[in-house]
Amino acid sequence: MNARAHQPALNHTASYYAASSLPQPELAALKGEVLADVCVVGGGFSGLNTALELAERGLSVVLLEAHKIGWGASGRNGGQLIRGVGHGLDQFTNIIGVEGVRQMKLMGLEAVEIVRQRVERFQIPCDLTWGYCDLANKPRDLEGFAEDAEELRSLGYRYETRLLQANEMHTVVGSTRYVGGLIDMGSGHLHPLNLALGEAAAAQRLGVRLFEHSAVTRIDYGPEVKVHAAEGSVRAKTLVLGCNAYLNNLNPELSGKILPAGSYIIATEPLSEEQAHALLPQNMAVCDQRVALDYYRLSADRRLLFGGACHYSGRDPKDIAAYMRPKMLEVFPQLSAVKIDYQWGGMIGIGANRLPQIGRLKDQPNVYYAQAYSGHGVNATHLAGKLLAEAISGQHSGGFDLFAKVPHITFPGGKHLRSPLLALGMLWHRLKELR
């Protein structure tokens, strides 16, 4: 493990992304009282994209980030940009109807297009690369992929999709672990922290006022909200909470509906062109189908970024590299002599039904929220920002209402017992995989 300079807790966690990020201007902390149409809490993809969309609609926006822009999951994730929102959307048919489910599936495709357009419009240098493959661990996974491909055709998906059998997998991944796959050329991968920083710069150009190191300490609710930080406050007509797994107890009603779960990534030293091509011949992002999934891809400088090992216990591994390296070598034993240059982790937000939670508080109709992306945050956050902005500005497209109709349970046991209880549930799912 290469030595890295210590970073203060308020800066980005030491990671490959932080070490290879765009220049980061230091943004001021909030001081004094400021006024805005909308106050957004959270400087990740949810907050940034809501702010962008609102500014484009002519509203004045103040965004508060407790640490640095992209400090949480937005700047630490696997960088996989994959179609879809939620898991098993057909389960919501009795709530939003067949057509409502179909519209959600279409929004899952639109979400990736929003990212594509954002990068193109603002010329954000985030290494956006197209090509993704779902990896089948078992024959039944491949059967599910065939159903997915047929559904994509029925939705009018315009990008190439192709089923692969076991004897074709070498064209995508240099491992013998998989029995098949589903290629999707409309999904891909990118540098997530650079995307967040580029979107922050775009938001500023549109007039959004961004404040870092401005953790919210208290919210006064009412027809006008007042959001307090250590040395200042924001008065606004509307509030958006976009903190996801890092909401903590800022709003107990929302934090009870989301489980923070740890996910971890290692990055190798730069590989030779020959090594990189042997691992991922088409430079695709890939992901397997297990509960404790593996996901991996190449960076622009040919490092293998290997992630997974979702933890529900609330305890991080003492040594992420020591924990993740054996998992990487199970897939790619040929990397046994390759050094690990970076290791990091972070929290993703998971809801009980695995559908992003996008809505507003019943007793505070001027307070909106978006959270619980369950590992699909890169695209779903961008969709959430658009839907929230449409609702707040009165330009309803119907998408916000569909998400808001779906109820979300509060995890039992409070903040101390909710993680162990869900860990037991996930263990049951892993045992099912052994059948």
Image: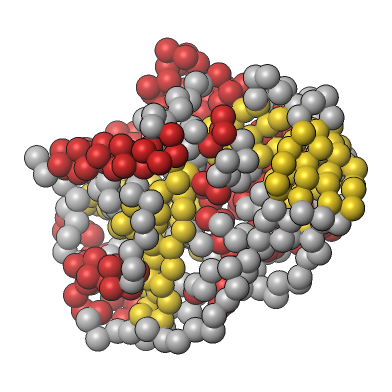
Q: How is the image coloured?
A: secondary structure
The image position of residue 428, as x and y in percent, is 20, 38
The image position of residue 48, as x and y in percent, is 69, 50
Can you see residue 282? no
Can you see residue 97? yes
Name the residue nearer the viewer: 413 or 424.
Answer: 413
Position of 213 relative to 228 (above/below): below
Is residue 110 shown left or right of residue 58? left
| Residue that appears at 11% across and 44% down | 434
Q: Quadrant of the C terminus?
A: top left
| Residue that appears at 84% across and 44% down | 234
Is residue 268 shown left or right of residue 17? left
Is residue 51 shown left or right of residue 424? right
The part of the image, by quadrant, that contains residue 194 is: bottom right
Position of 105 relative to 343 (above/below): above
The part of the image, by quadrant, that contains residue 56 is: top right
Q: Quadrant of the N terminus?
A: bottom left
The part of the image, by quadrant, that contains residue 368 is: top right
Name the residue nearer the viewer: 156 or 262.
Answer: 262
The image position of residue 387, as x and y in percent, is 66, 33
Position of 198 relative to 341 (above/below): above
State the residue lying farthest toward the left.
435
